[in-house]
Image (cartoon, rainbow, N blue to C red):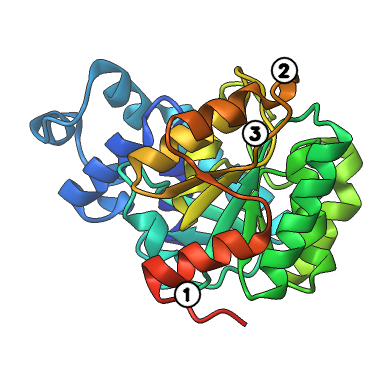
Amino acid sequence: MNSSIKYWIWLSSLVQITPRRKIGLLDYFGDPALIWESTEAELRSSNLCTPKTLAALLDRQARKDAVKHMEEVFKCDAEVITIKDGRYPEILKNIPDPPAVLYCIGKLKKDAVCVSVVGSRRATLYGLETARRLSRELAENGITVVSGMARGIDSKAHCGALEGGGRTIAVLGCGLDIVYPPENKELMENICRSGAAISEYVPGTPPLQLNFPARNRIISGLSRGVAVVEANDRSGSLITAEFALEQGRDVYAVPGNINSANSAGTNKLLKDGAKIVTNGGDILEELKMEYDFKYA
């Protein structure tokens, strides 16, 4: 592993600093090694460092831990893809707060056309089967399906894409050495064979609740559109839809039973202007019209 990667891993491990501020620091200094080597006075002169940011950048323990994180990345056979790496997805670079580093097991395709399929962890049979079918139809037509590998809709989305013989990307809210939920170990292995599991978190990072909303911006950021299959009015997938709108992505929603709490979120999205989806062909036609995408 390139020794300069240590500086990227160090910067990505500083969870006290927001992704947007990290990008600002990279734009100003040009390279994480130069941030590492800067004096306190030089860091202050950038006008990018709050007291919290400055403390994180100068923290000695974090610098020592960077070597340990490098070893953990090597152990889990992950690649380190920096925002300056040619393999970094171009579409993700263009969101307001892209991750400075992606840790990846499997392969990312820079030119892949991606659609996110997300929804409730506590889904109904209707939601689960719809997510599976929708994702299978997308994958059969060359679309890479992106989701978060959570229980429920996310897991079925990945399964459907694999059944369709296509690629799928799992965006994790923890380190790549942790399978969460644990019952998805085999699913994660299958995802990595043809697609990828990615995370902005260094190995060893537990699946903390606060990680998942941040993870959702990457799910939408990788995609041309986000399809919400089933969601109640408090579902995390609605956060993904909000990120999608902020990032200029399309939002699709599958209509649900008006008497079911599980469909309250998706039906509200439709009221608010989301595009109605009943099968994969609906999304494929939208992609063809908006991006002149030639699907299989």
Residue tagged by mark 1? 111
Secondary-structure class at tag 2 = helix
Q: Nearer the viewer, mark 3 or mark 2?
A: 2
Quadrant of residue 173 in the image?
top right
33 over 55 or under it: above or below: below
Name the residue: 60% across, 18% down.
233
Where residue 243 appears, as percent x and y from the top left, is 43, 37
Q: In 3D space, how far apart are the residues under numbered discs 1 and 3 (Cα atoms)?
A: 29 Å
Name the residue: 59% across, 51% down.
116
Where residue 66 appears, as percent x and y from the top left, is 52, 43
Residue tagged by mark 2? 261
Circle 3 crowding by C-alpha within 10 Å: few under 14, some 14–19, many from 20: some
Circle 2 crowding by C-alpha within 10 Å: few under 14, some 14–19, many from 20: some
The residue type indicated by label 1 comes to Asp
Where residue 260 appears, as percent x and y from the top left, is 75, 20
Residue 167 seen in this snapshot: no
Q: In 3D space, how far apart are the residues under numbered discs 3 and 2 (Cα atoms)?
A: 33 Å
Residue tagged by mark 3? 205
List the single residue furthest toward the front. 258
Which comes before the other along the chain, label 3 or label 2?
3
Q: Nearer the viewer, mark 1 or mark 2?
A: 2
